Image (cartoon, rainbow, N blue to C red):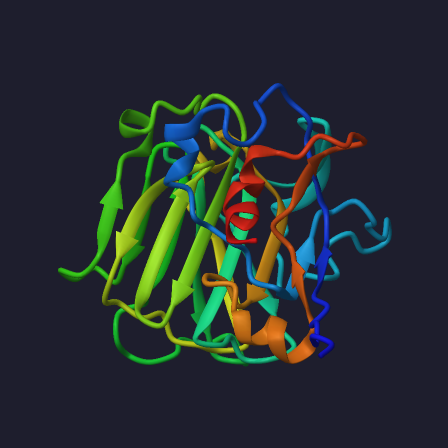
Amino acid sequence: MTANRLGLLLLVVPLAAVADDRPQPGTEGERWSKYDFVPGAKALFFEDFVAVDPTSPLKHLKNPSKRLDVSDHAGGKWLRCRPPCDFDVVLPETLPDRFTIDFDLDGPGGNGLRFNTVKTDGSAVSAEPVVYADSSQSALAYGDGGDKGRTNQIDRLTGLDVSKPLHFSWSFDGAKVKGYAAQVPGLDVPDLKMPRTARLHFEFVGGDDPDLIDQNVVTWITNLRIAAGGNPILLDELTKKGRVVLNGILFDTGKDRIRPESTPTLVAV
């Protein structure tokens, strides 16, 4: 009797990242063992500000503030803001129950990036308090001003070098939300759901005193990615289609060295 064999194909989509001296997966076992963020497989939006149109560098953003522009920073192209400023991202479809958002951010102290969902026309989802996620070099926060919200002072608790750009990741699964600063799980909120829409509002929080506004310190972001899906990688997709696309395998720019951020996807494989 001849045995039937099922051939399974894994498609790895490598994502380039800024090169540095961080070690390979597994060399800091304890530090990376708790990092379980796997980016969603279906990209709904991605912007690294590299292939920009010089006549309209912010054309992929909706209603960007005049205080936003694209500039060279930390070896790449970044969206630069002297807070306060904001922009929206319009998606091709409504966010599913499970989705992920991640980006690189560089900004001193509490200067960071806050985001929440809005209606298609940009208005608030409801009269209820806005459910938002907030990332900065000093803290991760998620909430609506009520008792279910959480804040974690990552600059004191994680031991990360917050003087350098950090990669922030957010994983949404129904009402369960996890936030990560670099490879460190920094926030876990079990029961506060962000409304699902096809538009997100991003805001760089800062002082708005007209006499002091130009003294606000610059904040930067790049590699903004919004994707459907996330943990767990579904076995049924693999068995039904014979393949699964993995977006969480990252390499140093121009090199064949796999970055430590790839650990969760490699473990899942």
Q: Is residue 206 visible?
A: no
Using residue 130 as the reference point, say whether residue 115 is left or right of it.
Answer: right
Using residue 232 as the reference point, say whether residue 165 is left or right of it.
Answer: right
In the depicted structure, whether residue 53 falls above or below residue 111: below
In the depicted structure, whether residue 90 falls above or below residue 223: below
In the depicted structure, whether residue 100 falls above or below residue 27: below
Return the residue nearer the eye: 80 or 15.
Answer: 15
State the image coordinates of residue 5 (x, y, percent, origin top left). Answer: 70, 72
Return the residue nearer the eye: 133 or 183.
Answer: 183
Query: In the figure, residue 19 lies in which quadrant?
Result: top right
Q: Residue at x 31, y 64 (%)?
A: 176
Q: Residue furthest front?
A: 1
Return the residue nearer the eye: 18 or 28.
Answer: 28
Using residue 220 as the reference point, say whether residue 186 is left or right of it.
Answer: left
Say how many tags the image has.
0
State the image coordinates of residue 141 (x, y, percent, origin top left). Answer: 31, 48
Return the residue nearer the eye: 29 or 21.
Answer: 29
State the image coordinates of residue 264 (x, y, percent, origin top left). Answer: 50, 46
Q: Residue at x 40, y 37 (%)?
A: 33
State the image coordinates of residue 41 (x, y, percent, origin top left). Answer: 61, 64
Q: Is residue 194 visible?
A: yes
Q: Residue at x 53, y 70 (%)?
A: 235
Quarter holding the N terminus?
Answer: bottom right
Q: Residue at x 47, y 36 (%)?
A: 182
